[in-house]
Amino acid sequence: MEIPITGQEPYADVFVGDSEMARLMRAHDWAGTALGSPECWPNALKVALRLLLTSRFEMWLGWGPDINFFYNDAYRPTLGIKHPQSLAMPTQALWAEIWDDIKDRLATVYQTGQSTWDRALLLVLERNGYPEETYHTFSYSPLIGDTGQVEGVFCAVSEETDRVISERRLASLRELASGLAAAQENAEVIGAMQAALSHNAQDLPFSLVYTLREDTPPVLVTAAGMAADHPLAAPDHWDLSRVLRGTGVIVEDAPAGDLPCGAWNKPPRQVAIVPLAGQRSHRPRGAVVVGLNPYRPVSADYLSFLELLAGQIASRLASAELMERRTRERDRVRELFQQAPSFMCILAGPEHRFELVNDAYMKLVGRRDLLGRPVREALPEIAEQGFFELLDTVYGQGGPFVGRNMPVLLQRTADATPEERFVHLVFQPINDTTGAVSGIFVDGYDVTDQKRAEDQLHQLNETLEQRVSARTEELRLALEQLHHEARERETVEQALRQSQKLEALGKLTGGVAHDFNNLLQVISGNLQLLGRDVAGNPRAEKRVENAMAGVTRGAKLASQLLAFGRRQPLQPKVLHLGRLIASMDDLLRRSLGEDVEIETIIAGGLWNTLIDPGQIENAILNLAINARDAMEDGGQLTIEANNAFLDDEYCRQHNDVTPGQYVMIAVTDTGSGIPQDIIDEVFEPFFSTKPEGKGTGLGLSMVHGLVKQSGGHVKIYSEVNEGTTIKLYLPRAVEDEDLITDISAAPVQGGSETVLVVEDDDEVRETAVALMSELGYHVLKSRDALSALNVIESGIAIDLLFTDVVMPGPLRSPELARKAKERLPQLCVLFTSGYTENAIVHHGRLDPGVELLSKPYTREALARKVRHVLAKRDE
């Protein structure tokens, strides 16, 4: 309703502004109300009305013994069709449907002068002509009149209906997805469906899941909110054939008196029948019958929620049906195998271990323990009879062997005399998917009785070829079935491998980093040696300097790959991050420039945390540089460190974090921000919001990998043109802060000790030897751990073992170090590697006491690290 503004409207000083409600109030006939003319109203009411009419927040106030109702423009949607006649109405008459819910709260304000507070309170409003489920967060505050008594109430309110219902439905979908994913057996699948459907009795007062097959009646799979033996749970009560066209149906004339109410005080008026989509055909595989919320309209969002529920159920039922079919087929093949009249077994691997044995085979050789044992161990009495050699030949050459009337001496019981039997048999090689032989299928007959009876033998000879051919065909069919089962198993394994993509990518980056860092080490070492040769030649020195810069960039890229894949070897210390951030002040100001104002906020009583000092410093610097790049014209960067507690509710919304105490680092900029449609992708490897060529896209991936490897959690908040905040949550450490020794500031000096360099890469080894020799050390070298152990056992005095971590050969580097220390207790050990795998790193951290120099390293870093390790021996 639009009220025009006149030149001089009455009470313009009371009902201020040009909002719709201000105009309505100025035009209202107040003389006919219990409140009287506005010019006589108390100042408290006038002041409150000015606040109400000038605010954009939802507000209303009531005045007088009848609590006559005033409200602003922002509150109109809450009233619905009750606007505008609700102006000045007594609150009890206006909100008769919820008066029992709010009257005690209003009484509290009037009687005690104290405010009330409610968060997301359920109120069933009749604002659109029907009862409707709504949620509101609001407070009632007293308005003191001129008499000093409470004469009115002021309410600030925020309707949260959409948020509450959306979160409730999302929780149902998440619970259903989680439960179905964890379920293995059919009973677990049904239980997961029933639990998830039962926990949302508001949107799903009752749920019935049916399966539909072409040649059988519908079957009730599970029921939630309604007993399975309830008369209305019977499939024939619902016209399920209506969903065979693949579309849902809304039943408007539901038998309300007989239906469960769920979370409400009355049963559903409408029922939805939603199809469970089939996998390869248009025909649904079933349907979900759902009682609909009697206090919510059937909206597109409501139907979409039901379709998502049905989609998850349909997908899991399809998977369960497929697994059941495969199990039946596998059991059928095994049953045929066991019941076959010929003796059969499957031998695996070059040792011919018994993998499967049928009853006929056990009857031939006697009841004994065969499965899992090599044939030479399980049947020792047939040694020297040629069978072992035949098996080796078939396995090695890949061709079948067919034998007829072959004599074999078998000791069928432990105390029995060896008995001669005659057999026809086939040794058929089994090939894997690559074509390589993986085992041998043995099939045959015990023909002892036929051999001993010439007339039967003659008859057997006439039909033998036909029988062998028939059995060979049976063998071929059985093998095809086994291969089919293997292919199906491979399909399932491929799905599992897809879900383990991150782990595989991490391993890949580790392998790449190992070779890449070895190459960088060769280049780096030789460039440093060349730099000393070209000293005094500015042009050559500049070229060496440029090449070393490229090596540094390559090493940084490899380090970021390892950090993203959570494969970097961490050396965590108990740190006070406030002191670390303070020590970075000069570095940050040099890196960010004068256009960026830096503010650090360190909370008092900040907890310690266990983290790699160098890696967390790099992570903070990386976040700061990203923030600088987002502030092209300068701005403010805020680095905050504080204590934080992540509770159960937060952790339920973020599956990758555990409740508990954390140290939180927040890096906030005033830059361009990140659009919401890509904010979930910023931690993906090689994703960047920067222009082409301005970044690798690995910076945030590295930060994310470091925090997750350290047991922490990362959260990002951003608004376009407002800025970005990235919060790192690191677990609290209760131990005292570690004293950290920075060897990077130590002088570069060599020594005269004897060093044994162990490296399988010839070029890396020669480079390391040259650098060590230039530093003055007496250097010995070995290409693998075994040859290095021989050098150590020769009695030569060695001060330091400098060994690569990942090398080929039967002796691993950690084992070499252990044996070397046993023979030379005073020996120092320094490991080096481009990627450690799990040799000296467990759970992402270096083993206690292990010293590691990561490749590629500089001459200076090598010199300092060697002196540091040798100095620790002399302490």
Image (cartoon, helix red, strand yellow):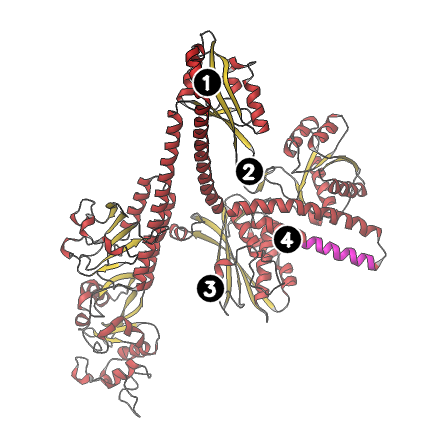
Q: Nearer the viewer, residue 544 or 512?
A: 512
From the image, tell me which residue sits under label 3: 676
Compare marks 4 and 1 and give the one earlier in the sequence.
1
Residue 247, image x and y in percent?
Answer: 29, 58
827 magenta-colored: no
Q: Amino acid at mark 2?
A: Thr
CA–CA distance between discs 1 and 2? 38 Å
Return the mark for residue 434: 2
Query: Which is closer to the viewer, label 3 or label 1?
Result: 1
Q: Which residue is mark 4?
A: 557
Residue range of the region highlighted in magenta in the rendering = 539-553
Q: Is residue 780 left or right of residue 448?
A: right
Q: Secondary structure at mark 2?
A: loop
Tell me the tag on residue 834: none
Q: Residues within 10 Å of mark 1 (few under 14, many from 20)?
A: some
Residue 549 belongs to magenta span: yes
Kind of residue at disc 4: Leu
Q: Is residue 196 visible?
A: yes
